[in-house]
Image (spheres, rainbow, N blue to C red):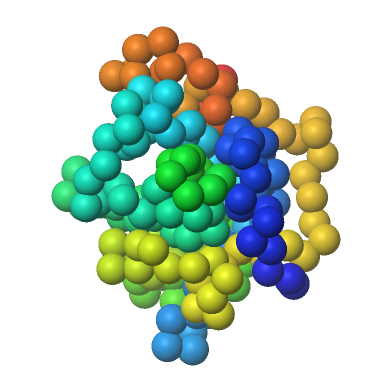
Amino acid sequence: MRKLTIKFYRRNNVVQIAKELLGKILVTRWDGIETSGRIVETEAYKGVIDKASHAYGGRRTERNEIMYAEGGLIYIYLCYGIHHLANVVTHTKDVPHAVLIRALEPVKGIEIMLKRTGKKQPDHSLTKGPGNVSKALGLDTSQSGYSLQSNELFIAEDGFTFSKKEIARSPRIGVEYAEEDALLHYRFYVKGNPFISGKPQ
């Protein structure tokens, strides 16, 4: 297993990056405890020109400032005051592109994930949806800004890839407010995978 290089994140095509993140492994090692999962669903957010993005129109706040940093960091925000959502910051400084990690297929540390989520038995809801992803992997807003080159939090490749036939794309989920941008096919997912958070489209 090898960490993705910083060059992977600092490319200018966030939609391509979102697609290429499928099959990669998101890893956390908090206090020496490792949990990980294979990415099976993502969504791209194209910054200042994307009405679904937190940075649309060049909006900058204390919460989203990390989106304007160099690619290769994690941006975690609180949704509805409940769910911590983890995003991969891409592109270069002052270009606030990001990819939301919507779903994982658990790889390592399932027992720890069960404790973190309060579940008694593993099922497909364990890492289904961005809120569950963060809960299972121990991610919260205090880690927003962490480098994905760190030893505590990173994305790796292990030689596994999904075939083109296995990958589908659709409009993003829950961004109806984004008007015409809600129709953009910026969501990527693995067909038939039980962990994906939205219905196939």
Residue pictured at 49% horizontal, 68% vertical: 147
Report the number of discs: 0
Q: Residue furthest front?
A: 94
Quadrant of image for the N terminus: bottom right
- Of residues 195 and 159, the one drawn nearer to the viewer in this rendering: 159
Q: Residue at x 54, y 76 (%)?
A: 150
**Residue 145 against residue 166 in the figure, above or below:** below
State the residue lying farthest toward the left. 81
As displayed, is residue 29 above or below residue 182?
below
Which residue is drawn at the image coordinates 55% and 80% (left, top)? Answer: 151
Taking 124 as reference, is 138 above or below it?
below
Question: In this view, which residue lies farthest toward the bottom?
Answer: 32
Foreground: 67 or 118? Answer: 67
Residue 103 in the image: state x and y as whole percent: 51, 48
**Residue 20, can we see it?**
yes
* Front residue (pair 122, 79): 79
Residue 107 in percent (x, y) is at 62, 66
Residue at figure coordinates x 62%, y 39% from the top left? 12
Give coordinates of residue 75: x percent, y percent.
39, 55
In the picture, measured across the screen, residue 54 lies left or right of residue 36, that is: left
- Asked if residue 198 can be seen in this view, the reply is no
- Which corner quadrant holds the C terminus? top right
Report the front residue among 127 and 25.
25
Q: Position of residue 140 (x, y in %)?
A: 31, 64
Image quadrant in which you'd find residue 134: bottom left
